[in-house]
Image (cartoon, rainbow, N blue to C red):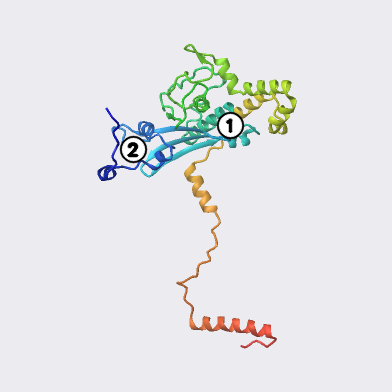
Amino acid sequence: MGFVKVQKNNSYFKCYQVKYRRRREGKTDYRQRRILITQDKNKYQTPKYRLICRITNRDVICQIASAELKGDRIHASAYAHQLKDFGLPIGFSNFSAAYATGLLCARRILTLKGLDKKYPGVKEVTGEHHEIKEDEDRRPFKALLDIGLVKPTVGNKVFACLKGAVDGGLLVPHSDKRFPGYSNGELDAEVHRDRIFGKHIAEWMDDMEEEDPEKFQKHFSKYLAAGLTSDKIEETYEAVHEKIRADPKAKDPVKAAAERKKNAKKPRSYKLKVNTRFTRQQRQHRSLQKLNKIRRGLGLPDRE
């Protein structure tokens, strides 16, 4: 068969349908989103929660969201840069920070829903598989993992957020196949735990200090300035986890936004007040003030 040129004629352009904006921008996988937000018909207007995990170059974002007609509603959120308030001075985009961010998000949503005492999560982080056991009175808070356009490779940082949320008390359906240390059908919990507490960072620091001290001083300058050496990393993350569990500083996003709007300073308006009307006496007084100002500049007395 010879070469057949595709003719884009008038009929083609009449039938052409523009894709959604976020699909054109390459930001949203709408097939995945439709599966995640579609709710059963017999659960009318019951929110279907998603654990949204996003990794940027310098931050980790975890959110609990549900879909509404006007858009997604965020019920709780946590960011890696907020870990400064819990004692982590530097390193907000690694695997350990992603775990702590997921833990913080889980504790915040459970605190807002009144489930923090009933579902405290794991007492000791071991890296092993953990499932939430349902209580007879109240079921656990369930959310589905939303990783966006990230490829679900083994050891990806979005699964650190997942592990932190599960250890924090959320019910997120998952398996261990994408956690670090999984191979040949089994999960090495010790390898997983070492990643959670930043042991890979400590080993990297020690190796670089031995091989190239000058590069080590330059590469880990912010760690050294913050006093975070290789032997203090695990202790630091343990302290961060304890502070998060003690007080996650949970705030309702809707109430927080209303408070910010209330306390915000109103910008000064330079537009003319068209609807303002002055009486004849006010206009005369105003013109007299202008005239007296000019007379003072000329050294003349004011008029009454």
At a point 58% along the width and 31% down the height, the residue shown is: 93
Give the SS element for disc 1.
loop
Q: Say if 296 sits above or below 60 in the image.
A: below
Left or right of 204 in this view: 169: left
Q: Is residue 250 above or below residue 270?
A: above
Q: Position of residue 8 (x, y in %)?
A: 29, 41
Query: In front: 258, or 21?
Result: 21
Q: CA distance from mark 2 to mark 1?
A: 36 Å
Place of residue 266 in the rendered image (x, y in percent of width and height, measured from the top left): 54, 58
Q: Quadrant of residue 15?
A: top left
Q: Earlier in the sequence, mark 2 or mark 1?
A: 2
Query: Looking at the image, which residue sits at the far right?
Result: 214
Q: Is residue 257 left or right of residue 197?
A: left
Taking the spot 53% from the left edge, 36% from the top edge, the residue there is: 78
Residue at numbered disc 2: 45
Task: Point out the image quarter for the C terminus.
Answer: bottom right
Please give the residue where the numbered disc 1 appears in the rendered image: 93
Left or right of 280, for residue 4 = left
> Which of the labelled discs sits on residue 237, or is there none?
none
Q: Nearer the viewer, residue 289 or 7?
A: 7
Q: Is residue 99 left or right of residue 38?
A: right
Q: Nearer the viewer, residue 32 or 53?
A: 32
Circle 1: residue type: Ser
Query: Crowding near pointer 2: few (<14 within 10 Å), some, many (20+)?
Result: few
Closer to viewer: mark 2 or mark 1: 1
Q: Secondary structure at mark 2?
A: loop
Give, as a three-letter code, the residue at label 2. Answer: Gln
